[in-house]
Image (cartoon, rainbow, N blue to C red):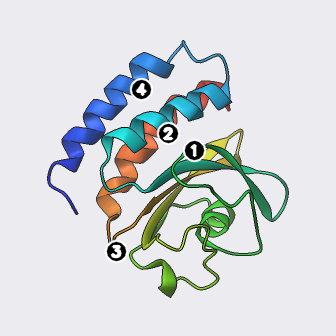
Amino acid sequence: MVDPRRPGRYDRIHAQLEDLVEGKSPNLAAAMATMCAVLHAKMPHHSWTGFYLAAGEDELTVGPYQGPVACQVLRGGGVCLHCARTRQPVIVADVEQFPGHISCDPRSRSEIAVPVIGEDRVVAVLDIDSADYAQFDDDDVAPLVKILNLLRPYV
């Protein structure tokens, strides 16, 4: 665990999002926007928190997010597309070391991407960047998946 306080933060974030999203969000975009706002505000190591939406075989387009201006379209490579292709979370301690990394913000140093799967296909990828190296590890995956499961009624 990168930060020993993180599990408690994730628990509180999940409870807050459960109250805000479950049965209350009118659609997927609203649920995602609320999720980004809460995660970004409550996790101090996040420099960018958002979703990229599946937009074809090898393309993602930016969805709801918090942080600096994002790449609007991702094609060809990068962390998020690798996540979408493999349908598995991707943790990158140093983005410069990831083959084919797409730099939307040169201040980004580490990243985690987690797929949002609905009806047996990836509909989006939750992408979180940090301005510091090695800010994500395996202990972030399960709580983020639990949070993303709140999107199930919308996907």
What residue sits 50% from the left and 18% below the top?
Answer: 22
Residue type beneath disc 1: Tyr
Tell me how far mark 2 sits from mark 3, CA to CA.
21 Å
> In the image, 3: left or right of 76?
left
- First in sequence: mark 2 or mark 3? 2
- First in sequence: mark 3 or mark 1? 1
Residue to which mark 4 is pinned: 17
Residue type beneath disc 4: Leu
Q: Are marks 3 and 1 in contact (CB under 8 Å)?
A: no
What residue sits 32% from the left and 40% below the top?
Answer: 42
- First in sequence: mark 2 or mark 4? 4
How far across and down, in percent of the image, does residue 147 sit? Answer: 43, 37
Q: Are marks 1 and 2 in contact (CB under 8 Å)?
A: yes
How far across and down, in percent of the image, does residue 11 sit? Answer: 27, 35
Residue to which mark 3 is pinned: 133
How far across and down, in percent of the image, does residue 18 sit? Answer: 41, 22
- First in sequence: mark 1 or mark 4? 4
Q: Nearer the viewer, residue 123 or 127?
A: 127
Tell me how far mark 1 sits from mark 4, CA to CA.
16 Å
Residue to which mark 2 is pinned: 36
